[in-house]
Image (cartoon, rainbow, N blue to C red):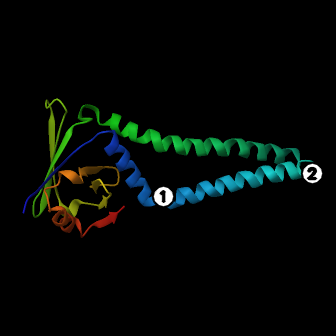
């Protein structure tokens, strides 16, 4: 049985890929760490102002340094969250906004990427045993061949009624629903 699908590697797809990749591992931890960091800052500054007269000069300088550094680290995390998908898209070079076409067969799948102007294309074929994991969101399916790269499939482009068959082909790999 052959299943056809496609996607366009645009800004929305890069953002969804980044969020799905990192949310799979860090969503709850990042929220928890952010809350702990905010509580830590409040306690740190409260203790500093409450006990400033009895603290040594070295401890006061360390507390002030931490109170300055923590908000910058939190801001850096937020910036990376929004900046990284833009860098991912930029890293695609000529294939940015290109069309990715997929054909899923019984034992393997083929992906063909074409530039938006149709001048260049590249093709890859993978066996299902090469798939590291699969993440499915409301709009996309991400097929990871290794830890650093994934193929993005727009679920709306999958042949009608065959999304269950595609899930079955990828089911023996770690399949995560978001």
Q: What is the x, y in percent for residue 127?
A: 16, 60
94 above or below 81?
above
Q: Nearer the viewer, residue 41 or 69?
A: 41
Which residue is painted at 43% across and 41% down in the image? Answer: 84
Q: Is residue 121 above or below residue 7?
A: above
Please tell me whether residue 174 is drawn above or below residue 137 in the rendered image. below
- Disc marking residue 54: 2
How far across and how far down the image is residue 31, in percent? 55, 57
Q: Residue at x 93, y 48 (%)?
A: 53
> Do the CB atoms of the residues marked 1 and 2 lie less than 8 Å apart?
no
Q: Residue at x 24, y 35 (%)?
A: 95
Specify the quadrant that holds the N terminus.
bottom left
Quadrant of the frame with the C terminus = bottom left
Going by the image, does 114 lie left or right of 72?
A: left
Position of 117 compared to 142: left or right?
left
Q: Is residue 43 left or right of residue 75?
A: right
Q: Position of residue 71 (x, y in %)?
A: 65, 43
Q: Give the residue pinned by disc 1.
A: 27
Element type at marker 1?
helix
Q: CA distance from mark 1 to mark 2?
A: 40 Å
Q: Does label 1 or label 2 sit earlier along the sequence?
A: 1
Q: Secondary structure at mark 2?
A: loop
Q: Where is residue 96? Give x, y as percent.
A: 27, 35
């Amino acid at each position: 049985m052959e299943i056809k699908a496609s996607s366009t590697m645009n800004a929305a797809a890069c953002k969804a890929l980044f969020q799905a990749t990192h949310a799979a591992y860090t969503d709850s931890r990042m929220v928890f760490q952010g809350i702990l960091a905010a509580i830590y800052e409040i306690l740190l500054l409260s203790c500093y102002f409450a006990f400033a007269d009895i603290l040594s000069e070295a401890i006061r300088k360390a507390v002030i340094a931490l109170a300055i550094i923590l908000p910058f680290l939190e801001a850096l995390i937020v910036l990376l969250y929004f900046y990284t998908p833009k860098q991912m898209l930029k890293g695609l070079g000529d294939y940015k906004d290109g069309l990715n076409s997929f054909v899923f067969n019984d034992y393997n799948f083929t992906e063909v990427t074409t530039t938006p102007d149709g001048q260049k294309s590249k093709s890859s074929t993978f066996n299902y045993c090469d798939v590291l994991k699969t993440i499915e969101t409301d709009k996309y399916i991400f097929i990871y061949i290794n830890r650093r790269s994934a193929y993005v499939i727009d679920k709306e482009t999958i042949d009608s009624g065959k999304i269950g068959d595609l899930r079955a082909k990828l089911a023996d790999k770690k399949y995560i629903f978001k």
